[in-house]
Image (cartoon, rainbow, N blue to C red):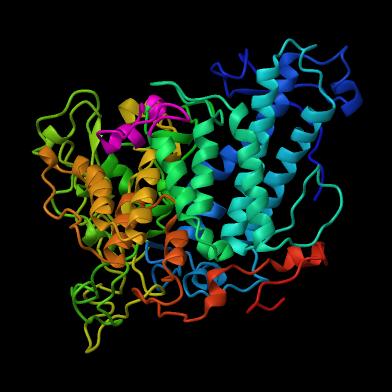
Amino acid sequence: MKKILNTIMTVIACSVLFQNCSLEPEVSSFLTPEQYYDSRYITKDKILARYSAPIRYWSDQYGTVPYVSYSTLSAWTTDEMVMPTRSVATQDWYDGGVYMCQWDHSFPAEREGTSWHNSWFSMERGVSEAWTVLSEFENEVDFEAAGLTEADRASMIGQMQVLIANNYLEGLNAFGGVPLYKEKPEVLVPRSTDKETFDYIEELLRKALPGLPQRKENESNTGTITQGVAASLLARLYFNAKPYIKEDRTEQCIAICDSILQGKFGYYELAPDYRDIFGFDNEKCNELVWAVPSEHGKREFEAGVAKYGTHYGTSSYLDNLNFSSWNGYCITPSLDKDGKNYRYETGKLGGPFKLGCPYDKFEDTDVRKHNYVYHGAIPNTTDPNHELVGNKNYYGMFLAGILTNPITGKSCTSDGSRDYAPRAIIPMEDKIAQLHPTKYNSTPGGGKEGALYAEENSGVRLMKYQPVPNLADNAKRFNPDVPVIRLTEIQYTLAECYFNKGNKTEAARLINDIRKRYFTGSSDPNPVPDEFDKYRLADEWLIEFIGEGRRRTDLVRWDMYTTESWWDHQADNDPDRNRMPIPKKALQANPLIKQNPGYGY
């Protein structure tokens, strides 16, 4: 790996680490490392600028979930989401099969542009950037001379350690053991074992934790890495210890989750409304443990990357012509071509399936299951569902069926360039198949169904992250911060630990404590019962965290990723597919690295 360049990106309006920092960058002059850390040149702002560089890279990596490497790996290779090939004439999003080889789990090591290819090199760069700064801070910088305290030094060093640990955790999760660097990366090293990687991640997090700041109640998110972040990453590590290193770390996981929930690592509490977590003013949400700061006109992050997952005509429905759509991914369908429900029936592509069918698994009275509608500060009574808005500006989390805005009357329509005629009002179908009544269905057998046969309107769309305002309120766009870790994950983790220990009653209580916020008057029609199986638990993870880039990890932990079938995906029954291939380019760059079993060069 190369050392990061000595280009200095300074951060203005920063005082000390524990106060709010502007994320607006400005480029300063080039200095050599010797000049940069010479006491004649060193200033608080320069130290903070060096500290901010690896965090900015982390923001870039997580700010556009699920259209970034780590999260696409966990979403588009599972029963949750798919990037189908759309329209026979144009073959939109086929792109040489780059998405299909992820969907079918063929995972060719030589294929560039895939989620595993990008994940490996994202991990390497993230480690390199953080280690370079960590080494400088430990060995070259006089914090006292720059007017910073020992607490500032401990916090900044700890945050670099957490970033390194987080990148290695992503690597362990995807590939198993990875090359470990315990100082600034300058020479090539071979892969460490799974256990060595696990232990080093744990060591870094535990070493960093005491020196990190604790989050305070209603404190605005600035991207600072806190004790809650380090503790939550430890919980993730212990939670997945069985697939990682074949060890049971349940008791350690329970202990750390309990400590987080009890406030020992800072102030956190469950949000009463999902829009507190994902909405326009979520920067002070007490449920958010780690989030990427985003602000209109400054550092903007399009979490959810709605342009990749919405139909071309969605801007009309949203009443915002500044919104563009590229019509790519969608959630996996619940229905077959003829309307049979894959949860309960055998459809065109098999079934019934215990996994997948995410849209159908949301209860009809779940407030999230409405189509997304933006109102603004004052709910418009033209909309019969205006009471759902409250003081949150919008309601709903999906785009399904006919999309006609209940306030403006404007609809999502075809532009005539793909499957349907110009200005045709077309529904977003909970199906992925060729449904056009004359192009494909005028003969017996009709059109085809599957990930290769989507139409422009195939698939329900997700509007979970970054709600879109109308054009009049466009200044609100990109204001929501991007959740990376939230307290619900910790409570669900604890619930699964109790499930595995046989205490299903307590597991159900913990999950139902969260489910109730999604129903008017907390009237949940289908709470988790005291006796339930692993498939119900897998469903709860799916509907709570859909689109948040964790599905593959959950399926691997439950040994479902390669052993279960879902829509248009037959079980691999190949345990080697639980891990990704090391990219061919990485093997060529470092001949000391060995490929994972089951994969070629």
Residue 234 versus residue 420: which sits nearer the camera?
234
| Residue 57 visible | no
Residue 33 versus residue 100: which sits nearer the camera?
33
At a point 73% along the width and 40% down the height, the residue shown is: 129
At a point 45% along the width and 44% down the height, the residue shown is: 255
At a point 74% along the width and 57% down the height, the residue shown is: 179
**Residue 334 % position (x, y):** 25, 67
As drawn, 475 above or below 353: above
Q: Is residue 30 left or right of residue 360?
A: right
Q: Is residue 251 left or right of residue 387?
A: right
- In the picture, the quarter occupied by the C terminus is bottom right
| Residue 503 visible | yes
Instruction: Give the quarter of the image for residue 448.
Output: bottom left
Check residue 212 for magenta coloring: no
**Residue 456 % position (x, y):** 34, 63
Residue 431 versus residue 49: which sits nearer the camera?
49
Check residue 275 for magenta coloring: yes
As drawn, 177 above or below 564: above
Q: Main secondary structure of the magenta part?
A: loop
